[in-house]
Image: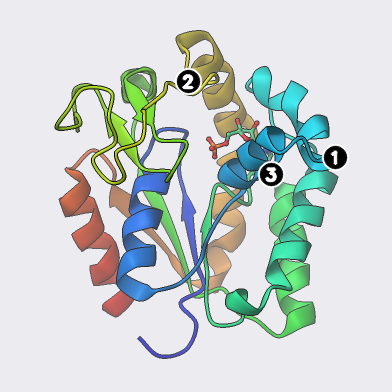
Amino acid sequence: MSGGLNLMLVGAPGSGKGTQAKRLVEKYNMPQLSTGDILRQAIKDQTALGIQAKEFMDAGKLVPDELIMGLIEERFGHADYQNGWILDGFPRTMPQAEGLSALLDRTGKKLKHVILLDVPGEAIVERIVGRRSCPACGNVHHVRFSPPKSEGICDACGGALVQRSDDTEEKVRVRFGQYESETASVIPYFEPLGIVASVDGQQSADEVFAAITGILEG
Ligand code: AMP
């Protein structure tokens, strides 16, 4: 695909954003900008950002907008972000959505697609609590829906799978509450651009991927 893809994936925690973003990266060779992945790496590396973000993430709460916008501005300056990107888990609040719009205006970039992965609230807890992630490569399995070939081992890289510390039922409820109260309102903000599409996120990962690529290439 020529030009920048400039895509945003939106959806509740556990709706499949990370899984689909990784497939899209492979197909279109665009960088994935996952604020969650960047923050987890910052915590591991004990950077100033990681130290500030940790208490919020441990509680399942959103990290303050200023920290997130600082991180985004920094990433957007990288050379590999000049030709398209896949936003995964950002923006998650109205100030972040407005901050993104301002940043795009300022840098002459345009958002081309907003894709909502639609999964009903009652399915979220099972999707997240059964999730097993690979800290080494970011691949995600699910104990029931996409079990690894060998238990506890990532199919993609052979790394040891873990349950993320915020993937417990108690924290999922907090995170989903934040999605409903803060993040869901980001979708109507982008509606006037005429670029928002919704995909049934409860289909198989292959079907969801086919639906997304259909929209991007449609
Ligand atoms: P995720 O990997 O997208 O599920 O994000 C994990 C956690 O990182 C969230 O529960 C938040 O604490 C934090 N986080 C990730 N992205 C954002 C964002 N755009 N704004 C605020 N907090 C975020």
Q: Is residue 140 above or below residue 124?
A: below
Please provide percent x and percent y for residue 5: 46, 77
Q: Earlier in the sequence, mark 2 or mark 3?
A: 3
* Residue mark closest to the camera, 1 vs 3: 1
Q: Answer yes or no: do the residues labelled 2 and 3 have beta carbons within 8 Å?
A: no
Q: Does residue 64 appear in the picture of this structure?
A: yes
> At which x and y percent is residue 93?
69, 44
Residue sitting at the far top: 170
Tell me: residue 60, above or below residue 191: above
Q: Amino acid at mark 3?
A: Thr
In three-dimensional space, the C-alpha distance between marks 1 and 2, rounded to whole angstroms, equals 24 Å
Quadrant of the rendered image containing residue 160: top left
Q: Is residue 98 left or right of residue 182?
A: right
Please tell me which residue lies in front, 71 or 139. 139
Q: Quadrant of residue 45?
A: top right
Marker disc for residue 93: 3
- Examine the rendered structure and indicate whether residue 3 appears above or below residue 206: below
> Mark 2: which secondary structure?
loop
Q: Residue at x 41, y 23 (%)?
A: 162
Q: Residue at x 52, y 9 (%)?
A: 170
Is residue 97 depicted above or below 84 in this figure?
above
The structure residue drawn at horizontal position 46% and vertical position 11%, both measured from the top left corner, is 169
Secondary structure of the residue carrying numbered label 1: helix
For label 3, being within 8 Å of ligand 1 is answered yes
What is the quadrant of the N terminus in the image? bottom left
Identify the residue under disc 1.
Answer: 48
Circle 2: is it few (<14), some (14-19), or many (20+) Cα within 10 Å?
Answer: many
**How dense is the environment of label 1, judged by Cα within 10 Å: few (below 14), some, or many (20 and up)?**
few
Residue on which disc 2 sits:
167
